[in-house]
Image (spheres, helix red, strand yellow):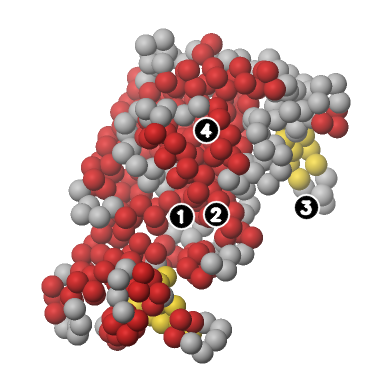
Amino acid sequence: MEITMPFNALPLISTIYVEESKELLRLAEDTRVALSVLDYAVKRLPNDAIVLDNLLLQEAKCSSAVENIVTTNDELYKGLSLSKMTPAVKEVASYKEGLFLGYTNMQAKANLLSISDIIAINATFNNREQGLRKNLPGLASSLTRIASVAASGEQTILYTPPHGLDLLNRLMMDLLEFIYDDERFSLHPLIKIALAHYQFECIHPFHDGNGRTGRILNILFLCNKGYLSKPYLYASAFIIKNKNEYYALLNDTTKSKQYDEVVKYMLTCFCQTAQETLALVEEITALYQQYTSGGFLKGLGGNKENLRTAIRLAFVKTYIRTKDLEDAGMHRQTASAILNSLVQAGFLQVEQQVGNSKQAKIYKNMDLLNLFGGKEQ
């Protein structure tokens, strides 16, 4: 394979052979159990909104960081709450939008995704030409190439993905048929999803946002196969921690056409992040129960249902304002009193923004922010 030329000989995923060895099947079973335990834990929550939105944001934050789009949790939640987003926060918000769009479209279409759905996902954060790549044939300057960039600015070409719209469509259609048709392609579903991630990154069908699109598809395919009921796997954190190994494996697999190691890597990613996401869900749930319990609320003044509403919003949004409580049906004076009561009780911390009005105040769920702060990449 000549790395400077389009890899138009990329095999169709439907033709790739992966032996279901005892090791792979054992790892797939461990992964299935970890995902099932996570899914059961979230289903048992009285209100999964207290974890779903935060897990989506944390996944979006880590997936964007893989592409060197870095923001802090404080910057992220504050920017979203005040609608004053830095470029990095906008990128993270766009990833979350793409993930939710894909999940919503999939639910509306018998739990399936089409190529047009994947294009729509990518369009939420693709900052270049949208749609599948339409490189001009025979024009070297139009080729899409993947390269590493040294500190000096020198580029080293690592890979040139397939070239030509018809070929990209054929490769993408084959990938979707491979995932969805379990009668024709009877490989273990988790092994199929792991292999499909590698194949998608090799196809590299877009001008921008391929990595983020591929990581979204991981989660949506897990939903499609019934391993997750909603897209709450915090999976990109694993890739961040093992980023060099991840890119080396993608490159080595393309050269060797030996797929076991990249499948093992992705299964390990799903398994470990399911376990870590479960731990995070349990920590969030414990905090939520602590602050909505009768013991905590007993010592506070004000209507207990209003207090619970404010606490729930502080878990869903992390940063809240008086307006959030007004939108939930409270009068401004009541909302202000409730928030002040929660500040005095040590649940919220108030931060004055630029300006002197009460609306310039923002209230932080510090325990939740500190919990995510411990996970900063």
Q: Which residue is mark 3?
A: 151
> Are the residues at dot 1 and dot 2 in contact (C-beta closer than 8 Å)?
yes
- Local crowd at mark 4 within 10 Å, few (<14), some, or many (≥20)? some
Q: How many numbered discs, if any? A: 4
Residue 270 position, x and y percent, is: 40, 38
Label 1 vs label 2: CA separation? 7 Å
Q: Which residue is mark 2?
A: 92
Indicate the quadrant where residue 303 lies: bottom left
- Camera-side residue: 201 or 30? 201
Does residue 355 show up? yes
Quick check: 337 left or right of 323? left
Residue 284 position, x and y percent, is: 30, 60
Reading the chain from its start, which is encountered first: label 3 or label 1? Answer: 1
Tell me the tag on residue 49: none
Label 3, secondary structure: give it: loop
Indicate the quadrant where residue 318 lies: bottom left
Label 3 vs label 4: CA separation? 37 Å
Q: Which residue is mark 4?
A: 117
Indicate the quadrant where residue 326 lies: bottom left
Q: Nearer the viewer, mark 1 or mark 4?
A: 4
**Does 217 appear above or below 124?**
above
Reading the chain from its start, which is encountered first: label 1 or label 4? Answer: 1
